[in-house]
Amino acid sequence: MLLTLVSAVVAAWLVIRPGGGDAPDAAPSPEQSPPPASVSGGAGVDGEFLFNYYDQDGDHSPVTGGLGTEALQVLSPVVVAQWAINDRWALNTSLGLDQITSASTDNIDDDVSSASRVDQRAFTTLELAREFETQTVGVSGGFSNEYDYRSVMTGLRWTRDFNRKNTTLAASGRYFADQVSLYDIDGIDRGSERRHTADLALSVTQLLGRRTVATIDVGWTAQRGFLSTPFHEVIVAPSPDLPVDYRVAERLPDARDRRAVGVRGNHALTDWLVQRGGYRFYTDTFGITAHSIESETHLRLPAANEMWVFPILRFHRQSASRYLVYPGHRRSIPGSSPPTETSVASTAGATAEGGSG
């Protein structure tokens, strides 16, 4: 399956700091969170406004058993504030809203008003960071809410500089406690279930010269609890002897471990041209393996030292989940019961993304 994906981001910086401040090396990419503010430059506030637009096309929606449209548009404004309280302490916060328009989600909502459905997700995060001579420690929390999903997050991060600040080691951990509302494939509220997620990340960043920096990172995520999406439906024929297809909700195991390793690099070709790129490998206990390659070329506009434009190219390829069932697929299941673990999400295929910022 090949999807057509387009993304764009527009960013504006507001700097309120005694004595002014330097521009960032380049604007953040649409898939990256803005980095925590440095607390070593004195008191002040940095403010950022980010706007993300995402558009997707496709013909295998899991909401309708792998047969419907995957057309999707997302508008996501985000406000980020970074307050350096003094030389040692900083407070970082973000507040955002995702507005999602998707024709397929009308099939799971009892308030069908048009050919498409608009859903919204609001989220916020807050981090308090303390800087020492060569280390930084941060404690964070966050909250996300949408009509069928609520999530509370707590986190801890640590960084330390070595080798005259040419080498940086970073480690972070987060825990998510989620509540999933069970709106099934007929739009009926079946109560709620819990999902628990813990993730750990470790990275090493090395300056390779005055204009080049490279990072190697590894990550591990453990999920426990209700991992299915209740409004994803699967159309299956339980056995060759029974011609009638079943329409059942997605069913997945209650445990999943994810592992990833990646390498990224930035190289400043000139003071106004920066090349970024990276590769990431992913695997999990659902049988999925994936490869992602990304490239960004950042160009500083000559009339504005703090404004950059950058095209984004990304290629992603993955294998299918072992629980994947294509529409109408017949499985040798004893008796007339449908399969115990099925999904139409996480298919094999490749995607190509292009965008600009």
Image (cartoon, rainbow, N blue to C red):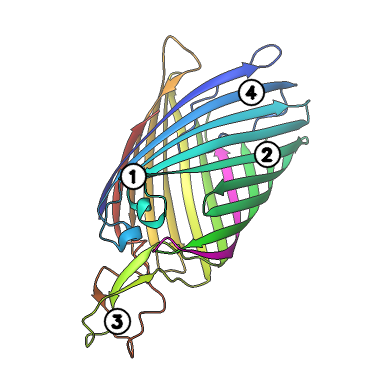
Q: Which of 316 and 118 is in front in this view?
A: 118
Q: Please, what secondary structure does the residue beneath circle 3 have? A: loop
| Residue 93 is covered by the magenta coloring | no
> N-terminal of the two: label 3 or label 1?
1
Question: Residue at image x 34%, y 60%?
Answer: 62
Q: What stretch is highlighted in magenta?
A: 186-206
Name the residue that disc number 1 marks.
116
Q: Please, what secondary structure does the residue beneath circle 2 have? A: strand
Mark 4 → mark 3, Cα distance in angstroms: 58 Å
Looking at this view, name the residue that lies furthest to the top: 303
Mark 3 → mark 1, Cα distance in angstroms: 32 Å
Circle 4 crowding by C-alpha within 10 Å: few under 14, some 14–19, many from 20: some
> N-terminal of the two: label 1 or label 2?
1
Camera-side mark, 1 or 4 = 1
Name the residue that disc number 4 marks.
46
Q: Which amino acid does label 4 sit on?
A: Asp
Q: Please, what secondary structure does the residue beneath circle 1 have? A: loop
Q: Quadrant of residue 239?
A: bottom left
